[in-house]
Image: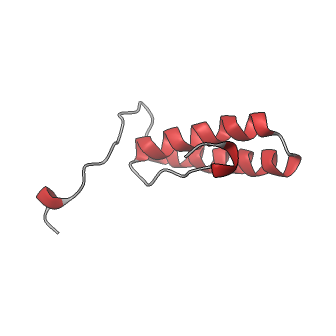
Amino acid sequence: MSPNTEAPTQQIQSSFSTGQSWGALRKAWKGYRIAKVQGDNTKMTEYATKIRKIQGELGVSVASFPNLGIA
């Protein structure tokens, strides 16, 4: 596939390195899983929002969280 036929990504500029962003994403997922086990919807929503933001910055597919109403 040539570069002209690829869909554009919604990558946002960040002041963090790629490695730092991946580390933050891992920590956010860990926090989300802990909040889910604890049944804390407020924290789950907070982490889900962070996860989606970081994924957008990295240019990877963005997760949806239908159980929180975040698609």
Residue in the image at 25% along x and 49% along y: 8
Q: Position of residue 9 (x, y in %)?
A: 30, 48
Residue at the limit of the structure toward the bottom, as seen here: 1
Q: In the rendered image of this protein, does residue 15 appear above or below residue 21? A: above
Q: Position of residue 22 (x, y in %)?
A: 52, 49
Q: Position of residue 23 (x, y in %)?
A: 57, 47
Q: Quadrant of residue 50?
A: top right
Residue 20 visible in image: no
Residue at the limit of the structure toward the top, as seen here: 15
Q: In the rendered image of this protein, does residue 55 appear above or below residue 42? A: below
User: Looking at the image, what colour scheme do you see?
Assistant: secondary structure
Residue in the image at 70% along x and 49% along y: 67
Q: Is residue 41 left or right of residue 68?
A: right
Residue in the image at 35% along x and 33% along y: 13
Disc count in the image?
A: 0
Choose between 69 and 17: the one closer to the eye: 69
Q: Is residue 28 left or right of residue 1?
A: right
Residue at the limit of the structure toward the right, as seen here: 38
Q: Is residue 1 left or right of residue 53?
A: left
Residue in the image at 43% along x and 43% along y: 56
Q: Is residue 13 left or right of residue 3?
A: right
Residue 42 visible in image: yes
Choose between 62 and 26: the one closer to the eye: 62
Choose between 39 and 24: the one closer to the eye: 39
Q: Position of residue 21 (x, y in %)?
A: 50, 43
Q: For the N terminus, which image quadrant?
A: bottom left
